[in-house]
C-alpha cells in the first residue's frame, strides 16, 4: 500500500513538472511546467490542474495507479507519460469517448433536460476495479475450473479484499444469484455449497433455504427439501412462495 501511494505521488510530481520548477535569477517567479502533450480526448487547451483532476478521478474509479495506463517505471526506469505504448491507455480513450456519447444521448433517452439527467462516469461501472465484471460472473468463472470449492475460494478472497466498498455485491443477494446460476446449469451440489456458505454470513436468510429446497429437489432429496421449506417459513412466516411449495411437496 505504501509503495503504491509513493508511486502515485511521484507520478503526480512528474505530471505537474514540480521537480523542474526553479527560481529565476534574483528570486523571480518559478519556471512554469512544460505543457502537456499528446492530449487526444481531453481538449488540448484544458488547464493542467483540470487534466490532473480528471486523471485522479479515473485512477480512483478503477482502483489503479498512473502506471496502469502510462509508461512510468519510477526512478531509474523509463518515464514517458505521453507515450501510447500501453493498450490500457488506448482502451481508456475509447471508454472516454463512449462515456461522452452516452451522456450526450441520456437527456433524450430519459426525457429530462441535460442538467437534470444523471451523468455516467468511470465509477458508474468500474466501482473501484479495473475490469467491472459482476460477482456472479467472477465466481462462476472460477468454479468452471475447480467446482464450487474454487468458486467459494474466489468469493471469500474478493470479500476479504473489497467488503465494505462498492465493487461487488456482498449482500445476501450475492451468493443467492450465484446459487441460482448453478441450479440453472444443473449443478445442484454447487448450489447447495453456495447456499450453505451464504447461511454462514446470513443465518436468517429464508430465501437461502427456499432456493436450497429447489436444489435438493433437483437431487431427488425430498426429505431435505421439506426441511428447507419448513425452515424458510419459520424464518419468514409470510413467505407465500415457500408455503405454496411446501404444500405442493407434501401432496
Image (spheres, rainbow, N blue to C red):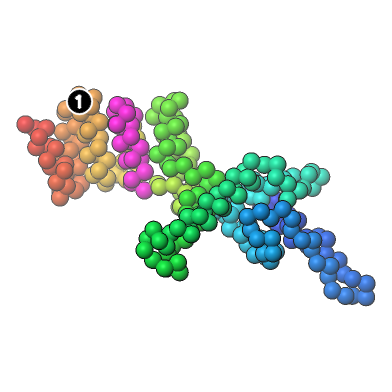
Which residues, given as a range, are shown in magenta?
171-192
Q: Residue at x 20, y 25 (%)?
A: 221
SS majority, magenta: helix
Q: Residue at x 41, y 33 (%)?
A: 140
Residue 208 x/y as whole percent? 27, 40
Quarter assignment of residue 145 = top left
Q: Residue at x 39, y 29 (%)?
A: 148
Q: Residue at x 83, y 61 (%)?
A: 20
240 in relation to 139, above or below: below
* Residue 244 on the magenta span: no
Question: Can residue 78 be seen from the camera position used here?
Answer: yes
* Residue 179 on the magenta span: yes
Residue 112 x/y as whole percent? 39, 66
Residue 62 x/y as whole percent? 55, 50
235 in relation to 144, above or below: below
Circle 1: element type:
loop
Residue 231 x/y as whole percent? 19, 40
Residue 37 horizontal side relative to residue 41, left or right: right
Work out which quarter of the rendered image holds the C terminus and state it: top left
Q: Residues within 10 Å of mark 1 (few under 14, many from 20)?
A: few
Residue behind mark 1: 221
Quarter assignment of residue 241 = top left
75 in relation to 31, above or below: above
Question: Can residue 189 be seen from the camera position used here?
Answer: no
Amino acid at each position: 500500500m505504501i509503495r503504491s501511494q509513493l508511486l502515485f505521488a511521484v507520478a503526480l510530481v512528474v505530471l505537474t513538472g514540480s521537480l523542474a520548477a526553479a527560481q529565476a535569477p534574483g528570486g523571480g517567479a518559478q519556471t512554469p511546467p512544460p505543457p502537456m502533450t499528446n492530449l487526444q480526448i481531453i481538449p488540448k487547451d484544458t488547464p493542467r490542474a483540470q487534466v490532473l483532476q480528471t486523471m485522479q478521478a479515473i485512477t480512483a474509479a478503477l482502483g489503479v495507479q498512473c502506471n496502469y495506463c502510462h509508461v512510468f517505471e519510477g526512478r531509474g526506469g523509463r518515464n514517458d507519460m505521453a507515450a501510447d505504448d500501453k493498450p490500457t491507455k488506448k482502451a481508456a480513450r475509447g471508454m472516454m469517448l463512449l462515456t461522452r456519447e452516452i451522456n450526450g444521448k441520456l437527456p433524450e433517452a430519459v426525457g429530462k433536460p441535460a442538467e437534470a439527467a444523471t451523468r455516467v462516469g468511470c465509477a458508474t461501472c468500474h466501482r473501484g476495479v479495473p475490469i467491472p465484471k459482476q460477482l456472479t460472473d467472477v465466481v462462476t468463472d472460477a468454479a468452471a475450473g475447480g467446482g464450487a470449492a474454487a468458486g467459494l475460494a474466489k468469493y471469500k478472497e474478493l470479500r476479504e479484499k473489497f467488503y465494505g466498498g462498492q465493487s461487488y455485491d456482498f449482500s445476501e443477494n450475492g451468493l443467492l444469484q450465484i446459487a441460482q446460476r448453478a441450479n440453472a446449469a444443473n449443478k445442484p451440489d454447487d448450489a447447495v455449497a453456495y447456499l450453505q456458505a451464504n447461511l454462514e454470513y446470513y443465518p436468517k436468510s429464508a430465501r437461502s433455504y427456499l432456493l436450497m429446497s429447489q436444489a435438493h429437489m433437483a437431487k431427488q432429496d425430498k426429505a431435505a427439501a421439506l426441511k428447507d421449506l419448513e425452515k424458510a417459513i419459520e424464518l419468514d412466516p409470510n413467505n407465500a412462495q415457500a408455503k405454496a411449495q411446501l404444500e405442493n411437496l407434501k401432496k
